Amino acid sequence: MARSPHMSSSRRLLARLRDIMAGGGRVQERLDQIVRAIANDLVAEVCSVYILRTGDVLELFANVGLLPEAVHRTRLRLGEGLIGVIAQRARSLALSDAQSHPAFAYRPETGEEIYHSLAGVPIIRTGRVIGVLAVQNRTRRQYTGEEIETLETIAMVTAEMIASSEVESGDDHPTLDGVTREPVSIDGLRLNGGLAMGLAVRHERRLKIEKLVAENPDAEKRRLERALAEMYGAIDEMLESDDLVQGGEHRDILEAYRMFAEDAGWLSRIDEAITSGLTAEAAVEKVRNDTRARFRSQTDPYLRERLHDFDDLAHRLLQHLVGREGMTGVVGPLPDDIILIARNMGPAELLDYDRTKLKGLVLEEGSATTHVAIVAKAFDIPVVGRATDILDVVNNLDPIVVDGDNADVHIRPTEEVRQVYAAALSARAVRLAAYASLRGEPAISTDGVRISLNINGGLLADIQDLQESGADGVGLYRTEIPFMARSDFPDVDQQAEIYTRVFDLAGDKPVVFRTLDVGGDKNLPYWREEDGENPALGWRAVRVALDRPSLMRHQMRALIRAAAGRPLTIMFPMITEVAEFDQARALLDLELELAVTRKRKLPEKLRVGTMLEVPALAFQLKSLLERADFISVGSNDLFQFLFASDRGSTRLADRYDTLAPAALAFLRRLVEECDAAGKPISLCGEIAGRPLEAMTLIGLGFRSLSMAPSSLGPVKAMVRSLAVGELTRYITALGTGSEHSLRENLREFARDHGVAV
Ligand code: PEP
Ligand code: MG
């Protein structure tokens, strides 16, 4: 097959670049050689590399053709001049008469007035622009699309070279990866409290691409074809094995995804990149980088979603080309104090990190209900979400402080800030030691009221610590968490295995198994459902289970099997009306009958209860309590429905208080009705883990609470310093007035009565 002259020129240049890179040396020397090689090969009189430095300034870093004194002196802000525009838009630009362009900014020190035409391309790495590569000519030259393509390919290789080089130290905290080195503080959203200091690790689903330049494009194309075939096969398998929602919307999504994987435009761009001399993996990465750069400037949510699909596809394809072993984030060993920084991530991905080293998590996106936050909570690490654009300013291994309580992140903190937090951390360590000493002590108030304190869990690790934690049991076992940590839907055997281990680890301590609460914002990686505009009010939890009874029955079968003669406690999430409880219960009865037919050991004792998360259910409480053995209030969901206030919304986070009169009146009513019916009530939302709120709940009559394991110590200390009788009288007298919140009154009570909140 005849090759176009452009293709051979591109490959020749890449081969030359490979030699330059293999030759080692300082970044500066190598960039100097690169610009000379490009100018030679593309017959350009000028070739320049600009690099993004501190404060969003593009500095002329290497050049041939302009006046030598311009190097390191010429600086343009993002958006300033043609170079600044290319960087800002992350788009290539080719102009036969650059000086007549409105954005042209003349810099006398460069002597560039004699050059008329200009072609420039962004240097992009992991979706971020880190510089610009440009050529100029005296004549009014029309650069061809192929020449631009060649420049883009070279820019990609240059980006890798810059990123893998030692960062040079110098005057003004220079950076070669486009990220500033100055201290930066970012406000986010509190997803989990706590405080941590450590070193930043950017969670990038990157694959280590060892070889960028290929000798034989045909061989690379064959590799690409094989990888594509493997990837198609894997997606087809996902489609076939997807017995969860056959024919449902999920299938449509997967099918659309499969269609994208065959997108002609995407494939031909990869093909072109290989033809220009890149290896198959480098070509996929190049196209992925271009897509990501576009993604960053795209505001249309639909298009963002599609671009995200292509990003995901590229990642999958790279896995087939490089293998999972090639996955890397930080080059070299991970630090002992990892502060993980991610755009967003699934819970399974968090589990890939060494739990003992993970000290904090910061997400660019994320809300309080994202499951990675729940898993992180189980790890007892501070989590800050909505840390806008943090990935633009943080480098791997930057020192970083995560203040989960105040939702602040301090990157490269000054010595003063560092010292303040170091002091806070050691004070916290002293407090934790005090809580630890309470482990063996009972949660009894000063006037002898016993409060049952339980933990919320979902990972085996949570249950592992149950015996030493001093908790009475597991008040909420979120069964969706092990589902989320997998790459496919577990069958009955696999589920039974997980639950058996939970039973074994819990020993004689009771565990409340909540049936699957997926949908809404709790997505399984292998199951994406369109859930409309209001996922929290959508097709989720027991609503899914009742529409897909086999899903619920499989889970119950697994639970009955795992209990194997031990007591079993089951709880349904998001029950909205008694009829739903009846339907769910009927499915359980079918499974019990099946167990009898199959001569399986039945649970020694069975308790079936429900979460109370939807206000409507409170108005059917009498009938509900005739059927349910207990209720557990899910205040996270309940309050968002009660106040019509999204639990993940930053804007609304402080608008309504959990200690508002309406909330307390609602809860009091629930307790009174349960007490009258002689049925136990407990509460397992976040507020159970906050001492002041927990105190209030006890004052309202709750005697059982379930919380994140890390909250046990503070809540137990509170209980042991509290006189329940006095508090009950106080709260009753307080009544329900017109105030926005009763928080201050309750805080005052605690202060006056020496309650440790
Ligand atoms: C709740 O809604 O309060 C609850 C405990 O359930 P989850 O947080 O899992 O939705
Ligand atoms: Mg809930």
Image (spheres, helix red, strand yellow):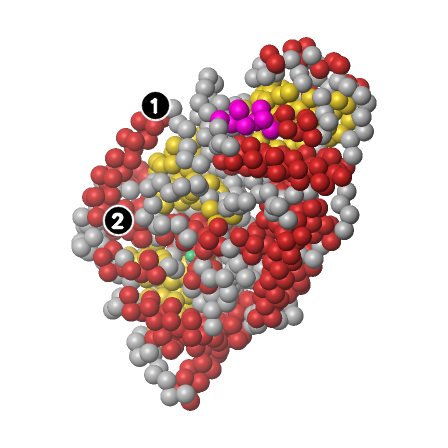
- The quarter of the picture showing ligand 1: bottom left
Taking 101 as reference, is 715 above or below it? below
Specify the principal SS of the magenta part.
helix
Identify the element where label 1 is drawn. helix
| Residue bearing mark 2 | 713
Q: 456 or 60, which lies in front?
A: 60
Q: Is residue 27 magenta?
A: yes
Give amino acid for label 2. Answer: Gly
**Dot placed on the residue nearer the N-terminal end, 1 or 2:** 1
How far is the residue under mark 1 from the one under mark 2?
A: 31 Å
Residue 598: % across, % down: 41, 88
Q: 369 or 47, which lies in front?
A: 47
Q: 594 or 37, which lies in front?
A: 37
Label ID, residue 108: none
Identify the element where label 2 is drawn. helix
Residue 239: % across, % down: 61, 67
Taking 730 as reference, is 416 above or below it? above
Q: Which residues are magenta?
A: 26-34
| Residue bearing mark 1 | 416
Quarter occupied by the C terminus: top left
- Residue at image position (73%, 19%) is 104
Residue that extends furthest to the top in the rendered view of this protein: 108
Residue 165: % across, % down: 48, 32
